[in-house]
Every structure is written in C-alpha cells, then in structure tokens.
Amino acid sequence: MNPVITAYDWVPDFAKGQVRDLRVRWALEEVGQPYDVRYLSQGEQKRPEHRSLQPYGQVPTYEEGDFTLFESGAIVLHIAGKGDLLPADPAGRAHATEWAFAALNTVEPPIMDQAIATLFEIDKPWSKPRLPAIEQRIAERLAETADRLGTRDWYRAAFSAGDLLMIAVLRILEGDPLLAAHPTLETYVARGTARPAFQRALAAQMAGFTGQAPPAMQAWLEKQGLAA
C-alpha cells in the first residue's frame, strides 16, 4: 500500500509551488516511493476529520497504514530514513539532520516574516515599518548560510534531507535581491531544483491545483490586488 499525503486542491497563484506538501513529494520522489494524495478544498483542513491527523489544521500529513505524521520536516526525515537521503553512519545522519533543523528553525522564520508583512498583512499599519528589520535578519541569515556552504555542492559530502529542506526554504526567495546577493546560494538552489525528483514533485503539485477559491478567499485576494 502506498503512503497517502494530503494537499490542497487550490491555493492563490503566489503560493503555487511553495505549499509544503512539495517538500514531502520531493523526498518521496528522491527515495523512489510511489504515493497517493488526498486533496482538500480550502476549509476542509480545519474540520475535525483532518485535525485528528494535523492538530493545527494544515497540510501536509502523511499516512502509512496506521502510522501517521504531520509537519513537513518530520515527514521528510521519516522518508529520508527509507532511502539514501540520510547517511548510514550516525555522525553523518546527525549532521544532515542539523541542516534540516537549521533550514526550518533558523533560516525560514525571517523569510516567512517577510511573506506575512508583504502579503498576508500588507494592509496592516505595522507591516511596512517592520520590513527593514525583517530584511536585515534575512540578509544576516543568508550571509551565514552562504559562508558555511562555501564552494561545495552540498552541505555534506552528498545531497541529503538537510539540503532538500534548505533548498525548499531558500527558493521562497527566488527572484528576490536578498538571495541574488549570494550567487553561491542561487547556484545551490538551481542545482537542487534541477534534480529530476524535484521536477517530478513540482509537476505533480502543480497538476493537483484544480479547485476554486472560496468566495471569502476570492474577496480577500481582490482586496489585496492578488486575484488572477
């Protein structure tokens, strides 16, 4: 039986290719594991049936028989243990895992703060004044991340779950001058997203967006000037 993940059947255009089930799909593709998808319409993720799997009402979730997981990072690390996305030796596994946590706990938070300020709370009076400080934090994190990568292809000897999650986070900034200031990181992201497994995962996620925006969401998009 294939594992089952959950994903949305619709998101705004700016979120397509960024929803976190992509990270899980990518890991599954890397280890060669077929999977099935249960698509949720907007609003279904908040219902009790889904909250029994994901207490925060988000996607993705992962089901493997009676075994279930939520949080994309935890799911990716679980999948990574089934293939070669984690080194076999304990020290190597620990080092790959530390980069997974660095991506999610250190690099991603200020990037998401920028998204909140420029998209989800753009009409709030506090958003614009916060941006310079947010961008400074992002710049600092990217400089530190680039410094540690140096001229290597990956953070360890071979591509790992740590690289997968770091690239998934950094590509949120594709086209942003903050990322462009670090050519080694841009090349690192391009190297990762050129992998066939990523390309298959991205194509699969994009193909799944067949639903419609709920009226309330459509009204919000129009108010923000984000409607298609």
Image: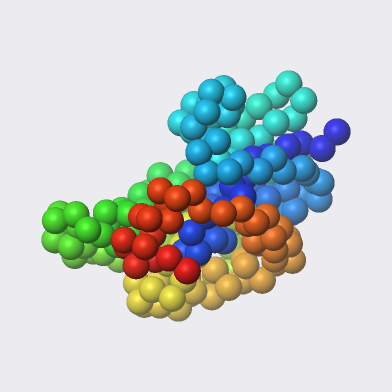
Q: Where 127 falls versus 104 (above or below)?
A: below
**Looking at the image, which is closer to me, 141 or 66?**
66
117 or 44, nearer to the observer: 44
Q: Is residue 183 left or right of residue 138?
A: right
Q: Where is residue 97 drawn, in percent x and y?
A: 55, 43
Q: Position of residue 94 (x, y in %)?
A: 57, 40
- Residue 220, above or below 43: below
Q: How many marks?
A: 0
Quarter in which the N terminus is drawn = top right
The residue sitting at 55% across, 49% down in the picture is: 20
Q: Quadrant of residue 37?
A: top right
Residue 129: give x, y in percent of width and height.
14, 61
| Left or right of 55, for residue 53 | right
Task: Look at the image and name its color scheme.
Answer: rainbow
Give the residue displayed 81% in from the left and 50% down from the top.
32
Quadrant location of residue 179?
A: bottom left
* Left or right of residue 39: residue 139: left
Question: In the displayed image of the protein, which residue is found farthest to the right?
Answer: 1
Q: Nearer the viewer, residue 7 or 75?
A: 7
Query: Do we see residue 100 in this rendering?
Result: no
Q: Is residue 186 depicted above or below 124 in this figure? A: below
Please tell me which residue is depicted at 68% across the width and 50% down the height of the picture: 25
> From what the image shows, is residue 216 above or below residue 173?
above
The residue lying at 54 percent from left, 61 percent from top is 16
State the image coordinates of residue 139 (x, y, percent, origin top left): 30, 66
Res. 213 visible in picture = yes
